[in-house]
């Protein structure tokens, strides 16, 4: 059995055939497209071989063989048979964890500071390393400001999501991409609000947190500063309507790309997400990671951009198991 990197050293192997019948043809088709992209990006094999887990999730030779086979497939039945005959499913952590969602927000921005656009979006500077959010917001250097925005709460959630789209005053859009962080620990302000009994634990989501911050503007800054991690950004003028690029260096595909704990899994590994209540069976590929994504059954599903994606992401909380697809040796 597979050795896990969890503290309990747990591993459960099952046949893919027992799960694949629950997955729609559409989901399998989209999943295969993402997996093909990963197979032939040149990045997956490097991640696999350089990861501390090598070769617990399959070795480079086994994966290369499966990728070459996948390239020639086109019809649904071929794909199902290929997956069943060539992969097993392995769960490495017994206790269920959480599936959440993330998205690419669209925020108002300007290149000039005004009475409205007064909250800075900063580029990376080593000067800020090790310094907490509250300190950076007080002493930031004007030369490091790449854009100004009109809403401190929307800016905070841009930091949480890690990238976004900036909408200029003339309605032109630009890409605001992740460019590092201050190396401080991420802390959930949602958990803090629960601990202080400011929001009931059964009513915490992105929208209730935003609502609380807006209603309590005198306290909002101190609350947001409980999360000491600060994100830096860069502007990319090319194709703002394209999907963002994840930590693996590949464009994220909404609904089929997830962030996982990259201390446990090499990025590029495919998974099936199974809801504990059996309401979800979704194939996905790990193209991203995040400081809040910790554990063998923890995942964050990329859901696209804008308000509709925000609505879905803000309400997505499912208890899940993650099953990694691992090639059979032949």
Image: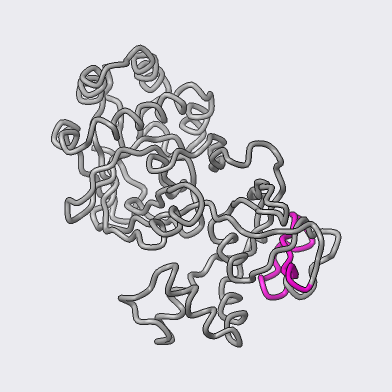
With 90 as the anchor, is 151 left or right in this view?
A: right
> At 78% from the left edge and 73% from the top edge, which residue is drawn?
115
Q: In this view, does 199 lie above or below 290?
A: below
Q: Is residue 126 magenta?
A: yes
**Apparent side of residue 105 relative to residue 17 in the rendered image (left or right):** right
Q: Residue furthest right?
A: 143
Residue at horizontal 50 percent and vertical 33 percent from the top: 47
Could you say which is closer to the camera, residue 112 or residue 54? 112
Which image quarter holds the C terminus? top left
Taking the image as shown, residue 210 lies to the left or right of residue 256, namely: right
Where residue 167 appears, as percent x and y from the top left, is: 66, 53
Residue 265 highlighted magenta (yes or no): no
For the residue pair 119 and 288, the one nearer the viewer reads as 119
Q: Position of residue 264 (x, y in %)?
A: 41, 46
In this picture, which residue range is highlighted in magenta?
Answer: 115-135
Q: Which residue is drawn at 58% across and 81% down?
A: 220
In this rendered view, identify the residue nearer to me: 45 or 32: 32
Give the image location of residue 61, x and y in percent.
Answer: 40, 18
Quadrant in the picture for the N terminus: top left
In this view, the residue in front, 71 or 46, is 71
Residue 70 versus residue 141 in the image, above or below:
above
């Amino acid at each position: 059995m597979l050795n896990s990197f969890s503290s309990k050293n747990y591993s459960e192997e099952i046949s893919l055939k027992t799960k694949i019948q629950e997955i729609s043809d559409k989901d399998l088709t989209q999943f295969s497209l993402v997996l093909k992209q990963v197979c032939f990006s040149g990045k997956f094999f490097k991640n696999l071989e350089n990861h501390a887990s090598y070769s617990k999730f399959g070795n480079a030779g086994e994966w290369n063989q499966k990728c070459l086979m996948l390239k020639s497939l086109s019809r649904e039945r071929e794909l199902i048979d290929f997956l069943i005959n060539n992969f097993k499913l392995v769960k490495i952590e017994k206790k269920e964890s959480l599936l959440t969602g993330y998205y690419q927000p669209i925020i108002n921005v300007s290149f000039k500071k005004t009475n409205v656009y007064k909250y800075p979006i900063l580029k990376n500077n080593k000067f800020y390393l090790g310094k907490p959010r509250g300190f950076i917001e007080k002493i930031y250097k004007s030369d490091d400001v790449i854009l100004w925005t009109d809403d401190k709460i929307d800016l905070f959630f841009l930091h949480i999501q890690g990238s976004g789209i900036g909408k200029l005053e003339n309605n032109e859009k630009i890409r605001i991409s992740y460019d590092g962080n201050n190396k401080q620990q991420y802390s959930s302000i949602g958990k803090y609000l629960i601990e202080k009994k400011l929001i009931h634990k059964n009513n915490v989501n992105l929208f209730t947190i935003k609502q609380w911050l807006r209603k309590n503007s005198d306290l909002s800054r101190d609350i947001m500063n409980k999360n000491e991690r600060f994100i830096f950004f860069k502007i990319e003028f090319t194709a703002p309507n394209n999907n963002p690029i994840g930590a693996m260096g590949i464009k994220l595909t909404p609904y089929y790309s997830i962030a996982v704990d990259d201390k446990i899994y090499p990025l590029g590994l495919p998974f099936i997400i199974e809801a504990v209540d059996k309401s979800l069976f979704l194939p996905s590929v790990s193209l991203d990671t995040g400081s809040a994504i910790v554990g063998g059954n923890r995942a964050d599903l990329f859901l696209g951009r804008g308000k509709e994606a925000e609505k879905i992401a803000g309400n997505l909380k499912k208890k899940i198991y993650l099953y990694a697809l691992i090639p059979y040796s032949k």
